[in-house]
Image (spheres, rainbow, N blue to C red):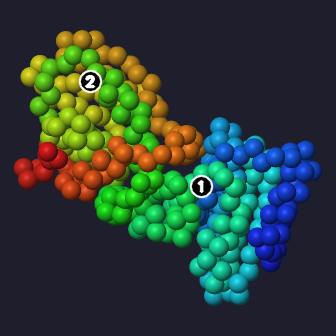
Amino acid sequence: MTIDLTDTTTGAISNALTEARRRLGGMTLGMVLTLIIVTDEEGQYDAIRAANQAAREHPCRVLAMITRRPKADSRLDAEIRVGEAAPGETTVLRMYGPLGQHADSVAAPLLVPDVPVVTWWPEAAPEVPAKHPLGALAQRRVTDSAAADMPQEVLATLARAYQPGDTDFGWTRATPWRSLLAATLDQPHPALQAGEVEAEAGNPTADLIAAWLNLRLGIPMRRSVSGGPGITRVSFTTAAGDIAISRLDGRTATLSWPSRPDRMVALHRRDTAELLAEELRRLDPDEVYAETLSRLDERGIETGPAAAPEPDERVVS
């Protein structure tokens, strides 16, 4: 069911949502959270589709906030979708004129009572997510540094502005790699001397993994540039030879260990819906992400050629 409301109010939107549930036979909300998406017309389709897919695991009310024509007269248009692609509710809110500067006052009356709020910026992240008007409404704030033109600068900005509840898809994408690396190094292994993370240029997940490994293992980590896609190799230097995980096709990794046969491991690149669903599973502060951001901000990651590092290339240590 789709309901279009033009030049409307939040009260009328709330009444329309209640009436839509009644028509569909749902007398209770049955939602576990409210997801606020801060987006624009160009990005709203992909963001809402990802949110609807994630809502199959986490039924929620989705509020897509779009600011249009800031010099126009104040007006609020709403497009309500209930019972179509997901078990929750989706409302696209288009704010015109000065109203766009007060998006929090539009969203607040539409939040599902007594459940957590998550705010997600699929594109440009604010400098301080916790102080953004829509971020201040949320217990969890999700950004995506990879969507920026200069991801490493965005990560540094997020590190300086970090508040409990902040997270970034650059860190979420690291979860399969971190799990595999932890499992690999959880077995007896030679002493690690140094490490290297190879990935395409501007990949924030590679920077975070390098900082995380440096933090946890206490060894120098180099961040090098490869042809991609994404992260292609993480390796550790030991006296017995290199321990390495290589993934050249974005789907399957090869674990190489000195004096052992190579092993194949599934390690596919996940889409936005999978990343969002993972973030919605936990709404408490991610302390490991905070520690890793802090290390990245303090030391930085210098990128260089994978095969032949420059003599002045820095390492994280």
- Residue shown at the point (48%, 46%) measured from the top left: 284
Callout 1 environment at 10 Å: few (<14), some (14 to 19), or many (20+)?
many
User: Which x, y percent locates residue 209?
Assistant: 31, 42
Q: Nearer the viewer, residue 69 or 15?
A: 15
Spot the residue most to the right.
23
For residue 168, side relative to residue 188 (left or right): right
User: Which x, y percent locates residue 106?
Assistant: 68, 71
Q: Is residue 54 above or below residue 94?
A: above
* Res 135 label: none
Amino acid type, residue under disc 1 in the picture: Val
- Residue shown at the point (7%, 50%) measured from the top left: 311
User: Which x, y percent locates residue 90?
Assistant: 73, 55
Amino acid type, residue under disc 2 in the picture: Leu
Q: Is residue 160 above or below residue 32?
A: below
* Res 185 label: 2
Spot the residue most to the front.
114
- Residue shown at the point (51%, 53%) measured from the top left: 140
Quarter-of-image position of residue 179: top left
- Residue shown at the point (47%, 32%) measured from the top left: 268
Q: Nearer the viewer, residue 52 or 218?
A: 218
> Would residue 120 be visible to someone looking at this image?
no
